[in-house]
Image: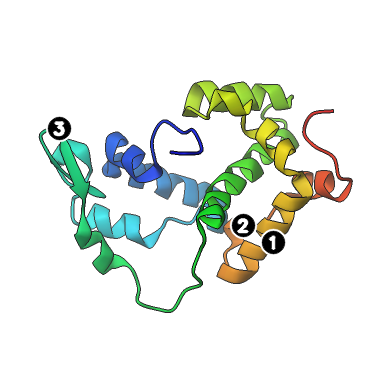
Amino acid sequence: LSFGMPMGPFTLMDEIGLDVGYKVALLLEENFGQRMKVAEILKKVYDRKWFGKKVGRGFYIYKGKERQPNREIYSFISNQRKPSLSGPDILKRMLYRMINEAAMCLEEKVCLEASCVDIGMIMGTGFPPFRGGILRYADSVGCDKIVADLERFKTEFSLERFSPCDYLVALGSKKQGFYK
């Protein structure tokens, strides 16, 4: 939330409904493969019919207007030793994947200009307007740094979802941004 998003990802999933989110996640995985692999925790929550706010339980437990974290979720998390993540790396893991997908929208001509992606992200997802949009934000960080972090995450976590697209790699290698 300190980044400026209207709510965190778990609150958003509970608001939308984890049943809806799970079905959408399955479609994304079906169409985009490992890049959009469904998180195991989402399946576990879905199997228990914890569909979020509408049923009173999801990532949070709801009692009237009050909510508290659903601590039973912790039992779904593997005790395997995983690399510890700093707050900045957690934010990067989420934002940089969004930037990569936005770059693919330009690469695949889904959108023709960075400004179209930015306005869509601001108006459609609540991306903080004061940051100018996801691609303006990317330019403020540097595409080369984003590519380096994505590659690092891909190696650390052995996950295809962190593979930077060719468009982003090209911008990074030329030390360019999405805006001229």
Alpha carbon of mark 3 to alpha carbon of mark 2: how far? Answer: 37 Å
Which amino acid does the dot numbered 3 rest on?
Lys
Q: Decide which of tag 3 and tag 2 comes sooner along the chain.
A: 3
Q: Decide which of tag 1 and tag 2 comes sooner along the chain.
A: 1
Q: Nearer the viewer, residue 89 or 143?
A: 89
- Answer left or right for 59 relative to 149: left
Residue that lies at the very extreme toward the right in this rendered image: 174
Q: Decide which of tag 1 and tag 3 comes sooner along the chain.
A: 3
* Residue at image point 35% right, 42% down: 21
Residue that lies at the very extreme toward the left in this rendered image: 64
Alpha carbon of mark 1 to alpha carbon of mark 2: how far? Answer: 7 Å
Q: Is residue 134 visible?
A: yes
**As drawn, 77 above or below 38:** below
Q: Is residue 58 visible?
A: no
* Residue at image point 54% right, 55% down: 33
* Residue at image point 35% right, 38% down: 12
Q: Position of residue 65 (x, y in %)?
A: 15, 32
Q: Position of residue 133 (x, y in %)?
A: 62, 28
Which amino acid does the dot numbered 2 rest on?
Phe
Badge 2: residue crowd in 10 Å (few <14, some 14–19, many ≥20): many
- Answer left or right for 146 relative to 65: right
Closer to the camera: disc 3 or disc 2?
3
Residue 162: mark in rendering: 2
**As drawn, 165 above or below 128:** below
Which amino acid does the dot numbered 1 rest on?
Glu
Write down the residue under mark 1: 151
Q: Which quadrant is the C terminus positioned in? A: top right
Instruction: Name the element at disc 3.
Output: loop
